[in-house]
Amino acid sequence: MKKVIAGSVLAGSSLLAAALLLAGSMANDWTINGAHSALWNLQRYGLMPALYAFAGIGIIGFLLAAWGLIEKDA
């Protein structure tokens, strides 16, 4: 049960951090005729490694929660 809670918190917090990072990137520079996107702005500011790290932590958290659900208690 502890793995499910820990994994869920880890996955949820990384999802929230990635959402804030994407929303914050669009708050500073608006698109010009629809040519730019949030990912372009993240690349411009050098924040793609942070987005990859949040995605990786989210995947690890999801796998930890799934492992906690599948594991049988002895």
Image (cartoon, grey):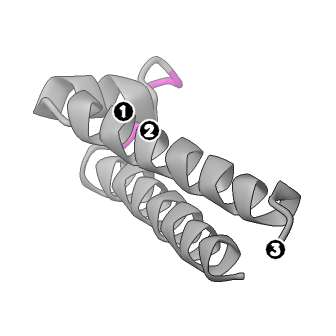
Residue 33 is a magenta residue:
yes
Return the residue nearer the eye: 62 or 74: 74
Above or below residue 6? Residue 38 is above
Above or below residue 42? Residue 9 is below
Q: Do the residues labelled 2 and 1 touch (CB within 8 Å)?
A: yes
Mark 1 / mark 3, whichever is N-terminal: 1
Mark 3 / mark 2, whichever is N-terminal: 2
Quarter occupied by residue 32: top left
Q: What element carries label 3?
A: loop
The residue to which callout 3 is attached is 73
Position of residue 52 measured from the top left corner of the image (x, y, whole percent): 36, 33
Instruction: Specify the label residue 56 is tagged with.
Output: 2
Position of residue 4 measured from the top left corner of the image (x, y, whole percent): 69, 73
Q: Which one is closest to the eye, mark 3 or mark 2?
A: 3
How many numbered marks have been drawn onto this rendered protein structure?
3
Q: Which residue occupies 27% across, 44% down? A: 29
Position of residue 45 measured from the top left corner of the image (x, y, whole percent): 13, 34
Quarter occupied by residue 49: top left
The residue to which callout 1 is attached is 52
Q: What element carries label 1?
A: helix
Magenta residues, start to end:
30-34
Q: Which amino acid does label 2 sit on?
A: Gly
Whether residue 47 sits left or right of residue 9 in the image: it is left
